[in-house]
Image (cartoon, rainbow, N blue to C red):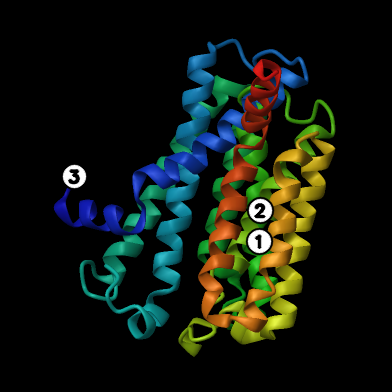
Amino acid sequence: MNSRWSVYFKERFPLIPNLLVALGIVESSRRLSLIQGSGQAGSVSFTVSFAVALIGGMLFLMQLRLMDETKDFEKDKIAHPERPLPRGLFRLDEFKSFVRRFQWTMILWTGAAAVAGGLPAALLFGFGVFYLHLMFVEFYLGDALARRPLLYAVLHQVIIFPLGYFVLSCFQSPWSDTRGFWFCTLLLGAFFGFEVGRKLDPGAHPVLRTYLSEYGREKTVFLLLVLLGVSTHAARQLGVSSILGPLYILILAGSSLLWWAPSKFKTVEGLVTLYLLVALWALPLQDLQQWIGGILP
């Protein structure tokens, strides 16, 4: 790989954390299919289905990172000039061209999705690619959408549903019962909550327009707790509330730090990040919890 791209991915898309995210979604989907008693969605082996789902998930995550990099360019020149794009590692037009070429890679992967999960997987992955394109062009709304940060966030976060349903479709019929919906809702609440809760620095540069600077502390914390509450409710519907419930209560209590010790904001950010990871791995973690409970006296 070109050394510039090696530097970029090392700094902005490190393999291990992103692989951990994608693996969590895929393994939880597989466990969910076992709970529902569904067989393979297609006629291929488990290994092929798992690989197609994992690579497809990684392609989604990578394209989201690449698109954000281009859209944040002007802000990063001011607030984060040390990042690869604003410091001149790539020209902006060169980088955008790569994003468009990468989109074609994803379109080609629709064929692999069809092999693993049949027509449903191919359609879901294809729709996800189309929706990513709409996100890249800001839904053709431009500045009008930029003036409405919450609407902008909602339109960008719902990509989690086609991603979640695609991964599920590699192992089972994604609409076999309501568990698929609740699984995607769990993911959406966790990812959206992470998006809100990962930028709680009261001293962040105004150009970044964080939720904290746009809506104030009270509304931001309320939004964070609502989103994670939705995720926790979905966990209850899936029977894994014992995994996420205590962590939600801890975040509920920890959010008070933003009032009486604002400089401790990283503690809350860390808890929100932990919540996301636990949510992604909730079903495998429940199996581990039950196994430990079974061997303890």
The span from disc 1 to disc 2 (Cα, nearest Å) is 5 Å
Q: Position of residue 280 (x, y in %)?
A: 61, 41
Q: Position of residue 214 (x, y in %)?
A: 63, 85
Residue 200, quarter of picture:
bottom right
- How many numbered circles are shown? 3
Q: Position of residue 246 (x, y in %)?
A: 73, 49
The span from disc 1 to disc 3 (Cα, nearest Å) is 34 Å
The earlier-in-sequence mark between 1 and 3 is 3
Q: Looking at the picture, which amino acid does disc 2 mark?
A: Ala
Q: Are marks 1 and 2 in contact (CB under 8 Å)?
A: yes
Can the viewer see residue 240?
A: yes
Residue drawn at 50 percent across, 34 percent down: 23
The span from disc 2 to disc 3 (Cα, nearest Å) is 33 Å
Residue 11, quarter of picture:
bottom left
Q: Residue furthest front?
A: 297
Q: Secondary structure at mark 3?
A: loop
Determine whether 73 is above or below 116 in the image: below
Mark 1 lies on residue: 193
Mark 3 lies on residue: 1
- Give whichever of 202, 185 is nearer the camera: 202
Query: How would you rate the neighbour count of disc 2 (Cα within 10 Å): few for under 14, some for 14-19, many for 20 or more?
Result: many
- Give whichever of 101, 163 is nearer the camera: 163
Mark 2 lies on residue: 190
